[in-house]
Amino acid sequence: MESTAFYGKVLWVDLTRGSLESTEVDGSVLRKYLGGYGLGMYYLLKHLPPGCDPLSPDNVMVVANGLLTGTGAPCTPRYVICAKSPLTHGLARSEAGGFWGAELKKCGYDAIVLKGKAKDPVYLRITDSGAEIRDARGLWGLTTGESEDRIREEAGDDKARVLVIGPGGENLVRYAGICSDLAHFSGRNGLGAVMGSKNLKAIAVRGKGQVNVHDRARLAEITRRNGQLAKEHPLSSLLHDRGTSPGVDVNNAAGCLPTRNWSTGVFEGAANIGSDRLTYDYLVDRGGCHVCSIRCKRVVKLNDPELQVERRYGGPEYETLVSFGSNCGISNLKVILKANELCNKYAIDTISAGMVISFAMQCYEKGLITRAETDGLDLCFGNEEVLLTLIDQIAYRRGIGRLLAEGSEMAARDIGQGAEQFIMTVKGQEVPMHDPRVKTGLGLQYALSPNGADHWFAQHDPFFVSEDSYGTKALAPLGIAGPVPALDLGPDKVRLVLYTSFLNALYDSLGACIFGVVARGIVPLDDLVELVRAVTGWQTSLWELVKCGERVNTMARLFNLREGIGREQDRLPGIFFRPFAGGPLEGKNALDREAFDQAIQAYYSMAGWDAQSGVPTDGKIHELGLGEFVTTMRR
Amino acid sequence: MTVWVHPALTSFLSGDYEALPAGEIALRIREGASVRDLLDLLGLPRGLAELILVNGEFARADTILPASAHVKIYPVFGGG
C-alpha cells in the first residue's frame, strides 16, 4: 500500500554498538498505526523487553513523528517520544510541538528507534545525507541552551534543530524531560533520564527535503481555511492573547486552584501570578509552532538586578504558574518565571518538580523533614529563595535534592512517618494542576491514563457542560450526544471520556496539537479527515481514524499489563474523596468513591476490557487487529 | 445590574453598556432574564464563558438573574 505522506523510513540506533541502520516500514503498518503515538506503541510492544530496568541499556526509546507532522497541514507540528518510564515503571510517552518534528521529516525519516547505551556521551546528527553518531563528551554537564549553541556551532549551521537533555537527564532525575528549540518540552514521565541513561545528549536535525503530499492543492485549501479560522475563532484568539494563564484566575474564583500542596483551593496571592500580571508585566512575545497561526506560547523576559530570565527559554504555561506558584505558596511572579527558566535549562518537568517541592514543604511544616536534613534550608511554603535552590539541588542531585530527584512517591517511602498522606500521584506520577472534584471526567483521566496522572488523556469536562459548549457542538460527529454535567459520574460521562480518549490518542498519532484541533482548538473533525486524505491519498474516514485511536489506547494497556500495572493502579489519591477545605467550595465536592469505582469499571466495559480486571478481552484484541501482541502479554 | 468581565474576554464585548471604574460595566436587562440572555446582550460568543458567579454563587446559563445582581464572568478553561 503506497502512501505519499511517509518516507516509510525508520532510523535504528544501537548506542552500545555504535551502529545506525535505516529500514523501510511496511505501508500496512503505517495505515494501521499512523505515526506518533501509534507507531511508538507498535515498536515498544515489538522490541522492548518486558520487565526491563527503565534506566538500563535494554530500554527502548522511540521518537516518532505524527502522520501529518511536517506535511504543511495546519496545527500538526507534534512528535511523540516513548519508552518505559523510570518514574512510573510503566509506559512513558510525551509529545511536543515546535519545529523539530518537521525538520526530522525533511531529513527523510518518520521515526527513530534507540536502544543500548553509549560508552561515552554522544549525540546524533541527522541531515538529508544521512545520520552519524558524534562525540558529546564536551557537551555533558552543559545546560540545554549551552548545548544547543555548541551543537549549532559545531555543525556550522544556526538553523539546526536540537532535541536535547540538560543536567536533569544526565543526573537521572526521574522526572527529567527533553526539549527542542529550548521551549518545546516532552516534559513528563522522565524521558530525559532515559536519554541520559543511554549517554545520549542530543539529536540535531537539519533537512532540506520536501515532504511528498498526495493532493497539494487540497491541502493548501484546507490549511488556508483554518488559517483564517485561527484569526477569527474566539478560542484561538483567547489562546493567542493570553495563553493558558487565565486558568489561574478561573480556578481561583471557582475555589479549585491547587494551593499549598492542595491543602485548599483558594490562594490569596492569585492575582499576582495570574493572567494580567503575566501578560502586561513580563510578556515580550508570543511563540508558535510549524504551520500554526495561533501562536499560543508565552515568551517572557526579566532583567531585574537580582533575577534575569532569558527570552530564549519561552515562558510559563498555567501548569507552571500554579505548580511553583499557589501550590508552593509563592505569589512572586518573577520567582516563578525564574523557576520555569531553570527547569527549561536543566530540562526537568515543571509539574512534577513543583509537586515534589510542595510535598517537601508540607513534610517540613509537619515536622517530617527537619532543618538538619535540609542542610539548613527553611522549606516553609512561600519561601521564594528556597524554591530556586531546590530546583538546582534536584537537577544536580545535591543535598535534599538527591531524595527529591526520585519523585514524591519514592521520597515519601524514604521519609516514612506517614509522609505518603501528602503525596498526590497516580502510577507514581504527580498530578497536574486540575482538581477532579470540579470535573469528574478529569479524575477518570488521571486514573486511567497509561502514563500516570495526565491531563490530556481525554478532553476536559467544561467544554461539554451545556448545549452552547464548544465540545458539545464540535464533537457531535463522534457520537457525543448532548451536554454532560461537570460533576456527573454516570454512563454519559464515561462515554465522553472513552470517546475523547480515542480522539486524543488519534491526535497524538497524527501529530495534531490539542490546542489546534477541536474541542479545545479550531480545526474541525471533517477537516482533519480531509487532511489525512489529501496528504496520504487514502480513502479513509472518521471511523477508521478513531479506531486507530482506540487501538493505540488498548496497546498502551497491553504494555502496562505486561509490566505488572493494571486495575490496582487505576486509582486516585485519597484527597479527592474528601471535600474542599476553605473557599467557595468549603465542605463540598468530595468524589463518591463507590460511584468513581463503578465509573472505572464502566470504562473498562465500554472499552471492551474485562469489567473487573481491566484486561482487554480476546474479542476486543482481535477486533482491533492486535492478535500479534497477545502472546507477548500473556507469557 | 453590574457586571465584571475577565480581562481576557473584554475584547469580545459589544452592545450597549456603561463602563464603570475597576473594569466593571453597568447595563439594564429585562426582568426574568437568564445568564444566557445577559451573555448574548454583552455579545460574548456562546460557549466562551463557562464560569459565571451571580452575587458570589455559581450560576448556569439558564439561571434567572435576580433584580439587583452583581455578575462575574470568566472564560472557559480546560487543559494547560
Image: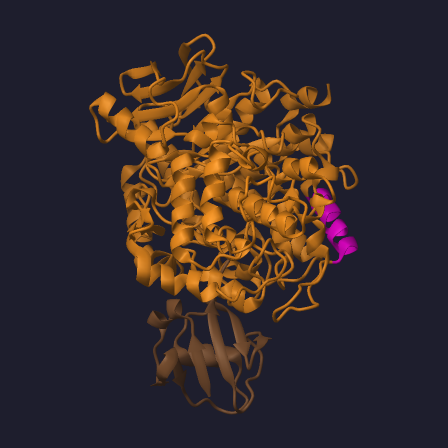
Q: Which chain is orange?
A: A
Q: Is residue A520 above or below residue A51?
A: below
Where residue A319 appears, as percent x and y from the top left, is: 48, 51
Q: Which residues are magenta?
A: A592-606
Q: Is residue A335 above or below residue B71?
A: above
Q: Quadrant of the C terminus of chain A?
A: top right
Instruction: Let me know if residue A234 appears in the view.
Output: no
Q: Is residue A341 left or right of residue A247?
A: left
Q: Which of A22 and A551 lies nearest the eye of the viewer?
A: A22
Query: Is residue A598 inside the magenta stretch?
Result: yes
Instruction: Let me know if residue A590 appears in the view.
Output: yes
Total residue callouts: 0
Where residue A504 appears, as percent x and y from the top left, is: 52, 44
Q: Quadrant of residue A612?
A: top right
Where residue A168 appears, as percent x and y from the top left, is: 46, 32
Query: Is residue A43 inside the magenta stretch?
Result: no
Q: Is residue A188 above or below residue A10?
A: below
Q: Which of A23 and A331 lies nearest the eye of the viewer?
A: A331
Q: Which of A283 and A534 lies nearest the eye of the viewer?
A: A283
For the point 54% across and 16% down, the residue is A57
